[in-house]
Amino acid sequence: NVVLPVAVTGVFVWAFIDAVARPPRQFALASQSKNFWLAMLGGGTLAYAAMSFLHIYLPLAGFIRLALFIAVVYYLGPERSKMGPGAGRGRGPQRGSW
């Protein structure tokens, strides 16, 4: 009963950390700015966690959760692929790699 909300919250946190780690110039290739995605992903993480774990009631909470999850999937899918490799990736071999 708790596994799914924890997993979905983990996806939100992963997306937010990815957005924080990316340089702003990569967001020029995306359809929205870095500030937009930080606000969307950070606010979405807090709102989803509040509804799931603190049981804060919001009208149409199911639709809000679905919309937030769609936004995270959109960021991790099409938006992230437009931006290319994130910070620390795509720069050639790193120390300790094959």
Image: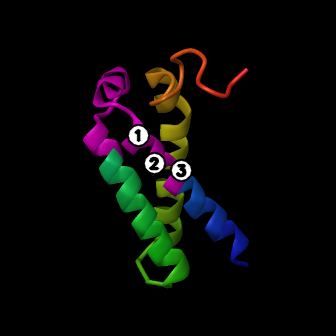
Amino acid of disc 3: Trp
Whole-number angstrom distance, CA of label 3 to CA of label 2: 5 Å
Whole-number angstrom distance, CA of label 3 to CA of label 1: 11 Å
Q: Any mark on residue 7, and which? A: none
Residue 82, percent from left and from top: 47, 22
Residue 90, percent from left and from top: 53, 19
Q: Is residue 66 above or below residue 26?
A: below
Residue placed under numbered mark 1 in the picture: 21
Residue 25, percent from left and from top: 30, 24
Q: Is residue 27 magenta?
A: yes
Residue placed under numbered mark 2 in the picture: 17
CA neighbours of label 2 inside 10 A, class few (<14), some (14 to 19), many (20+): some
Q: 75 or 58, which is in the foreground?
A: 75
Looking at the rendered image, the disc whose residue lies closer to the viewer, 3 or 1, is: 1
**Please, what secondary structure does the residue beneath circle 3 have?**
helix
Residue 69 appears in the rendering: no
**Image: magenta residue range:** 13-37
Q: Any mark on residue 14, and which? A: 3
**Please, what secondary structure does the residue beneath circle 2 have?**
helix
Residue drawn at x 51%, y 17% is: 91
CA neighbours of label 1 inside 10 A, class few (<14), some (14 to 19), many (20+): few
Residue 27 sits in which quadrant?
top left
Give the quadrant of the C terminus: top right
Residue 5 appears in the rendering: yes
